[in-house]
Amino acid sequence: MVICIKTFQGACNTYCVHDIGTGRAVVIDPTVSYQTIHTAMRDFNISIEAVLLTHGHHDHIGAVDEYKHVPCYIHQADLYMPTDTRNNLSRYFGVAFKAEATLTSFACGQTLHLANMEIHCAHIGGHTTGSSIFRIGTAVFTGDTLFSDCVGRTDFPHSTTHEELINNIDKNILTLPDKTHIFPGHGEQSTLWRIKQENPYI
Ligand SMILES: [Zn+2]
């Protein structure tokens, strides 16, 4: 499996990950339209087969309903968030968006076999109760848990604690090889090695 990762800038970083050999793809945190991704990727002849959500905040799910024809995965503890304007926080940001897509939950430690890829899910509660990261090969998509220069906020209504977030990062991310590529929900991508040097929160 050789994967290609393309970043799209929406309300958050939206990632399209496709298997080079087959063109089969997943989209992580869709905040740009299905058509935008398909048009940008037309030379690769991709087919999007699933959507993965790192957590249920509105700025990570804004375009999810355009992908209704494929399964959409979110951690079971965040299942209640996308479909409610209060729980996904959109109401407080003047958007009042609620997702209508059918959501499928996964559990911590589960490996999803989608689009010819093995997608390893790890639960990193803290920013939200069910926040999760996805590892595909040497790439890790961290949502709002870990950024290149800071960590996620834990002062939202459905956050848990900063201590829990840090413990989860220690256990599930810092134990990965230094060459691991980190693709966060906002800001620049980095490597775990660089984050260990430059991020003062870990
Ligand atoms: Zn968030």
Image (cartoon, grey):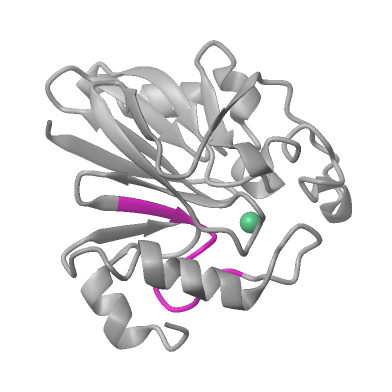
Q: Which residues are magenta?
A: 140-152
Residue 186 position in % (x across, y down): 50, 60
Picture quarter with ligand 1 = bottom right
Q: Is residue 103 left or right of residue 95?
A: left
Q: Nearer the viewer, residue 85 or 163?
A: 163
Q: Is residue 35 left or right of residue 118?
A: right
Residue found 66% across the figure and 54% down from its top: 129
The reply to whether the magenta stretch includes residue 190 is no
Q: Is residue 12 left or right of residue 173?
A: right
Residue 167 position in % (x across, y down): 49, 73
The reply to whether the magenta stretch includes residue 148 is yes
Q: Is residue 170 left or right of residue 192?
A: right
Residue found 55% across the figure and 20% down from its top: 67
- Is residue 147 at least partly visible in the picture? no
**Rendered-image quadrant of the C terminus:** bottom left
Residue 63 position in % (x across, y down): 61, 31
Residue 157 position in % (x across, y down): 81, 61
